[in-house]
Image (cartoon, grey):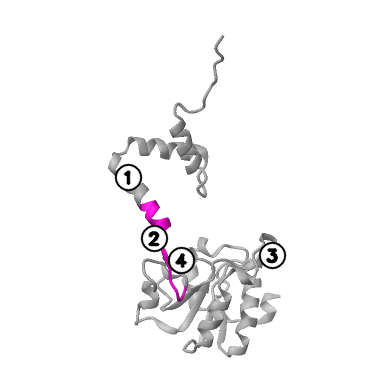
Amino acid sequence: MLEYTHRKYPSVLLERAVEELSKLPGVGRRTALRLALHLLRCDKAATERLASALVSLRLEVKYCRSCHNICDADLCEICSDRNRDGALLCVVENVREMMAVESTGQFRGLYHVLGGVISPLDGIGPGDIEVDSLVERVAAGGVTEVILALSATMEGDTTCFFIYRKLAPTGVGVSVIARGVAVGDELSYADELTLGRSIMQRIPFEIKEAL
């Protein structure tokens, strides 16, 4: 007697697609299934363009040799822009938060993307983020103020304190964005008006704030 095996999906290929899509942030299996079925209904060329764009993104994207922003060349458009104020350097955790600050239209300096924050519980130490390259940029001259635009979390404050101590010998001014961004909030979730005001109303960094 043949044993009947019930399968959740009518196609192994569909199941594989759902499995991979569900690994994306914020995408559950239901959403993944809806996306997979949508791609099946789309024109074949549209699906191929999507697949090609994703492969190109993963294999060809570059990181700016100066600020570590995502770009298509060795130097990103912001670092290449001669109209930007190179004396101001805004330090952010990741590219998404750099985009959040840039979208406010309030900042016309340059950026430095750390690629994370210090988090011992997650096994992320100072050597795992771009702090040394930040110190090198400042030590090279031309920067008069470093703005620490990190999330108002314990990890963000710890990173601010560490950077402040590392930059102290250079004599550069160090400030933090005003606490218009609520303590404990992720920077990328702040609305543009609040974030813009925080940048414009930044205050000098003091050790006691980080303790």
Which residue has dot 1 on it? 48
Q: Earlier in the sequence, mark 4 or mark 3?
A: 4
Disc nearest the viewer among 3 and 2: 2
Disc nearest the viewer among 2 and 1: 2
In terms of secondary structure, where does tag 2 sit?
helix
Q: Position of residue 141 (x, y in %)?
A: 49, 89
Asked which quadrant contains residue 106, the reply is bottom left
**Labelled disc at residue 60:** 2
Q: Distance between the Cα atoms at labels 2 and 1? A: 17 Å
Which residue has dot 4 on it? 100
Name the foreground residue: 120 vs 176: 120
**Residue count near mark 3 (Cα–Cα under 10 Å), binned few <14, some 14–19, many ≥20:** few
x 50%, y 82%: residue: 137
x 47%, y 83%: residue: 88
**Labelled disc at residue 65:** none
Q: Amino acid at mark 4?
A: Ala
Quadrant where the image shows the N terminus: top right
x 45%, y 69%: residue: 69
x 52%, y 50%: residue: 25
Q: Earlier in the sequence, mark 4 or mark 2?
A: 2
Which residue has dot 3 on it? 120
In terms of secondary structure, where does tag 3 sit?
helix
Quadrant where the image shows the C terminus: bottom right
Q: Distance between the Cα atoms at labels 1 and 4? A: 30 Å
Name the foreground residue: 27 vs 79: 79
Tell me if residue 84 comes above or below residue 48 in the rendering: below
Q: Amino acid at mark 1?
A: Glu
Q: Are marks 2 and 1 in contact (CB under 8 Å)?
A: no
Q: Earlier in the sequence, mark 1 or mark 3?
A: 1
